[in-house]
Amino acid sequence: MDKSPHWDDLRYFLALFERGTLSAAARTLAVEHTTVARRIDALETALGARLFDRFARGWTPTATGVALLPAARRVEAELHGVWRAASAGGAVRGTVRVSAPPALCAWLLAPAMPALLTRQPELEVELRGEARMADLLRGETDIALRFRRPASPGLALRRLTDVGYGVYASARYLATHAPRDWQFLGYDETLGETPQQQWLERFAGARRHRLRSNDLGTLYQAARSGAGVAVLPDYFAEAPAGGLAPAPGARCPITRPLWLVMHEDVRRAPPVRAVADALVDWFRRRQERRPRPGARRGAVRALKGRRSSSAEEER
């Protein structure tokens, strides 16, 4: 019976080494935790060595496991290189994985898919809404959209667009609450370092935050439902039937560049190149369709006018 280790088992070893628990490694690999345990057992049997100590709070690498790590990463890098070389030519077919923050996936990437998939009938796309930053160098994704420009060598990047932020609430909330009475909806402590949340904390001052969340979609739904005032990306307000109105007299100056990032080798693969080119084109056309800044100021003035007229009628 062949006792040689299976190369694929090294993926499970690396995921468990980095995540620390079976459940976390299983989420990374999109498998059941029992599969991770079984593959680690098989690798240990093939190598004749114990790689992890099992504890209730997690699996801790043994000295042998720590010693194996550099070699496992080299093997993984070589296997990714083989895949990239094989993918460098051929037709536009197969699966391309795109990692981006969840709100970007839902609001900006998903609408770009129909045209691309119509043009490329043999292409499949996995849109992964992730708060974490997938590792491009280790092949966890093919394309990533990021607000932070990566500095790692071996990555190709392009600035897709600039995402602006505004202060929004439902029109009814703004009509019934003076600015001094505004209450705010913002990120919780896990995202408190983002520039838009830091600006909101300063802008709110002594006024209360009534709801916090780590999910942008939750803040959007709370704002359009009338729970308070939130700082949100402008693309939420641009959507048809978005249910948001800009808060008069409140201008958020935050603008964040959005980067499209790929591994230098993977970007040459026809399927990856097709998806990347489609995203670049879609964001370019979206930018051309966006209203000029003056149009947005006009909308704010119109809202102010409606509020003034309502006040006069009440008097």
Image (cartoon, rainbow, N blue to C red):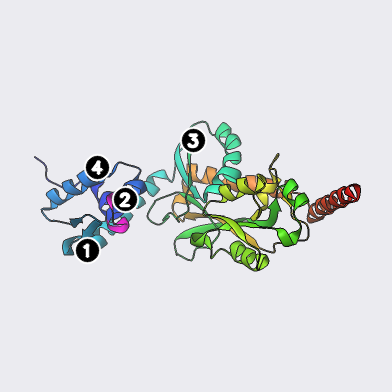
Dot in front, 2 or 3? 2
Q: Is residue 281 visible?
A: no
Q: State the residue in front, 54 or 278.
A: 54
Q: Is residue 118 above or below residue 35?
A: above
Can you identify the residue that label 1 sits on?
66
The answer to which image quadrant residue 209 occupies is: bottom right
Can you identify the residue that label 2 sits on?
25
First in sequence: mark 1 vs mark 4: 4
Dot in front, 3 or 4? 4
User: How far is the residue under mark 3 from the one under mark 1?
Assistant: 39 Å
Query: What amino acid type should be assigned to the residue bearing mark 2?
Result: Ala
The magenta segment is 17-22
The answer to which image quadrant residue 2 occupies is: top left
First in sequence: mark 1 vs mark 2: 2
Residue 261 % position (x, y): 51, 55
Residue 310 % position (x, y): 86, 48
Query: What amino acid type should be assigned to the residue bearing mark 4?
Result: Thr
Q: State the residue in front, 278 or 229.
A: 229
The answer to which image quadrant residue 77 occupies is: bottom left
Residue 272 % position (x, y): 49, 45
Can you identify the residue that label 4 sits on?
34
Label 1, residues with CA under 10 Å away: few <14, some 14-19, many ≥20: few
Label 4, residues with CA under 10 Å away: few <14, some 14-19, many ≥20: few
User: Would residue 83 be found to the left or right of residue 47 on screen?
Assistant: right
User: How far is the residue under mark 2 from the one under mark 4?
Assistant: 11 Å
